[in-house]
Amino acid sequence: MPTSVPLHVNGQATTVSIDDPDMPLLYALRDNLGLHGPRFGCGLGQCGTCTVHINGEATRSCVTPLSSLGPDQKIVTLEGLGSPENPHRVQKAFIDEQAVQCGYCINGMIMQAAALLARTPRPTEEQIRNELANNICRCGTHARILRAVKRAAGAA
């Protein structure tokens, strides 16, 4: 029997109708709400492509069951971080540094970096590297990604 789950996503209260309360948040975001910033990568919370912010914390949505969330928890996806007309400073820095090759990992890289900069506005290079260490990029744009995060922090 379908259940309605209230969520607060990108500044909007919404509900999703689901059959399984343990369905991953990622599926609700993509399939029910049409948000395609977070992507399916490994399904184990290890690659980072599905990263969203929940109450400001970078969180792997592929391993976050809907049953663990409520309407009081603020979920932000890449689409809610900024817009094409008004990108978040991290999104702008990634564009300026041309830090995207295939683009599959970029959602996770941007969301992880934005969470870091929210809590540590002027991170060291080591802090940036540690923060992004569990986000996998197979294209090899790590140097550009690092420059983009430094630029967003005002350190470039």
Image: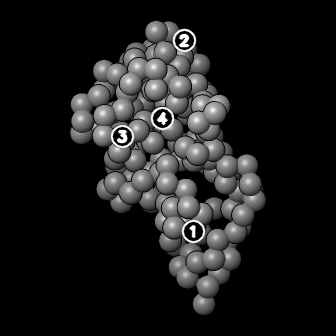
- Which amino acid type corresponds to the residue marked 2 in the rendered image? Gly
Q: Are marks 1 and 3 in contact (CB under 8 Å)?
A: no
Residue at position x 46%, y 16% in the image? 150
Quarter of the image where one finds residue 84: top right
Residue type (three-letter) at the residue carrying disc 3: Gly
Residue under the image location 24 percent in, 39 percent down: 138
Question: In this image, 141 relative to 80: left or right?
Answer: left
Q: Is residue 123 visible?
A: no
In the picture of the structure, the residue carrying the numbered disc 3 is 103
Identify the disc placed on residue 110: 4
Q: What residue appears at the point 63 percent right and 33 percent down from the top-left corner?
A: 85
- Does label 4 or label 1 sit earlier along the sequence? 1
Which amino acid lies under the numbered mark 4 shown in the image of this protein? Ile
Q: Which residue is mark 1?
A: 32
Q: Secondary structure at mark 4?
A: helix
Mark 2 vs mark 4: which is more N-terminal? Answer: 4
